[in-house]
Amino acid sequence: MILKLITVCLPWRLKRLALQSWFKYKIHPTARIGLAWVFPGKLVMEKNSRIDHLTIAVNLDLMQMSEHAKIGRGNWVTGFATNTNSKHFRHQPERKAELIMGEWAAITKNHHIDCTNSITIGKFTTIAGYQSQLLTHSINVYENRQDSAPIVIGDYAFIGTNVVILGGAVLPGYSVLGAKSLLNKPFDEEWKLYAGVPAKAVSDIDKDAKYFSRADGFVY
């Protein structure tokens, strides 16, 4: 704990060296972490990836951020690491508590990302707006135990503000999840707008839409 407190307070150049030396994290020289409490089991940050101020990321096995991936301010990234003696999730020996972000993937700010099971966010995908919840675990009332399932979000997806995505859900690439929607199951059709509670495909998306072919991940 003392090493973590010291590390958080250091200027970035020294902080990166401390994270690499003391915690064995792999951080590219052009990557950056702001004033944030980011201590997963393993951390990999590739070229120009970034984690902004006031983000907390704890109790994960792995956080892996590809080139230019970004996590904005005030996000809460939690999990339930697999290297514990807890009785929770013992029935899931293959479970991985990890967040994997593709190149140019972006999480804006003030979201809750629960990585008790794995969350994969494809390249050029945006989790936009505020206060969305990605929840990979819940109570299984039939078995009376905690249960979890991964969440998969494809490439070039756009997720609107204040949504809920539950474990086992899949949002295909080249699709949109509308604001305030609940995604609670896997879908496989690309080029669709999914919306509602629970979400369903409500319309097609024109393949000429420029968001889905951009080479620069950030929209200005």
Image (cartoon, grey):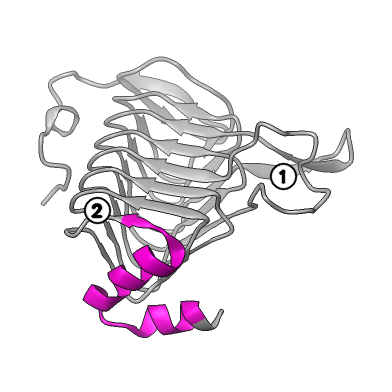
Q: Is residue 194 above or below residue 111?
A: above
The image shows residue 93 at horizontal and vertical percentages of 72, 34
Question: What's the CA distance linking mark 1 and mark 2?
Answer: 31 Å
Near-viewer residue (65 or 171): 65
Residue 59 coordinates in the image, percent (x, y): 59, 58
Tell me where the magenta segment starts and ends, as one range. Answer: 3-26
User: Which image quarter holds the N terminus?
Assistant: bottom right
Front-most of 145 and 127? Answer: 145
Q: Quadrant of residue 25?
A: bottom left
Of labels 1 and 2, earlier in sequence is 2
**Residue 215 x, y percent position in the rendering:** 10, 34
Q: Which mark is residue 49?
A: 2
Q: How many marks?
A: 2
Task: Look at the image and say whether residue 162 sits in the magenta stretch.
Answer: no
Tag 1 residue: 138
Res 121 → quadrant: top left
Residue at point 38% right, 67% down? 21
Q: Amino acid at mark 2?
A: Ser
**Disc on res. 166:** none
Crowd band around label 1 with a 10 angstrom C-alpha radius: few (<14), some (14–19), many (20+): some
Q: Residue at x 36, y 50 (%)?
A: 44
Magenta span main SS: helix
Q: Secondary structure at mark 1?
A: strand
Give left or right: position of 13 versus 75: left
Q: Is residue 14 magenta?
A: yes
| Left/right of residue 171 with respect to residue 15 in the rendered view | right
Q: Secondary structure at mark 2?
A: loop
